[in-house]
Image: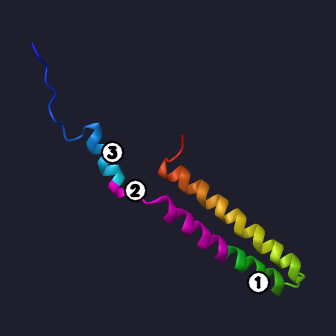
Amino acid sequence: MTVTRSEAPNNEEGALAADAVTRVPRAVWIGFALVAGALAGATAGLLSAAGGVPVPLAILAGGGACGSTVALMLAVVRYATGDHP
């Protein structure tokens, strides 16, 4: 007696192929995070300088805002897409 497996539409190979088609490349998420970080950093730096903070400290505030935004966005994307071990 032989047992044959029927081709079900929800088999593992079909699910992986469908997931690969709808998946957004990692470079797109990194680019989006970098652009958002640059905008947040520039805004924080300009607002700090306009508020009377010396320019070197305003640059540091903008850099901190940029780094924090990029890190937060990449963490949120990793969580939202389920792309973690």
Helix, strand or loop for disc 1: helix
Q: CA distance from mark 2 to mark 1?
A: 36 Å
| Quarter placement of the N terminus | top left
- In the rendered image, the vertical position of residue 22 relative to residue 41, given as above or below: above
Disc 3 residue type (three-letter): Leu
Query: Magenta-highlighted stretch: main secondary structure?
Result: helix
Which residue carries the number 2 mark? 23
Q: Nearer the viewer, mark 2 or mark 1?
A: 2
Please say whether residue 23 is one of the residues in the magenta stretch: yes
Q: Mark 1 or mark 3: which comes first in sequence?
A: 3
Which residue carries the number 1 mark? 46
- In the rendered image, the vertical position of residue 83 relative to residue 5, given as above or below: below
Measured as percent of width and height from the top left, residue 36 is found at: 61, 72
- Which image quarter: residue 34? bottom right
Disc 1 residue type (three-letter): Leu
Disc 2 residue type (three-letter): Arg
Give me the residue at 30% from left, 48% from top: 17
Q: Which mark is residue 16?
A: 3
- Which image quarter: residue 9? top left
Q: Which mark is residue 19?
A: none
Q: CA distance from mark 2 to mark 3?
A: 10 Å
Q: Mark 2 or mark 3: which comes first in sequence?
A: 3
Q: Mark 2 or mark 1: which comes first in sequence?
A: 2
Q: Answer with left or right where residue 35 lies relative to residue 81.
A: right
Magenta span: 21-39
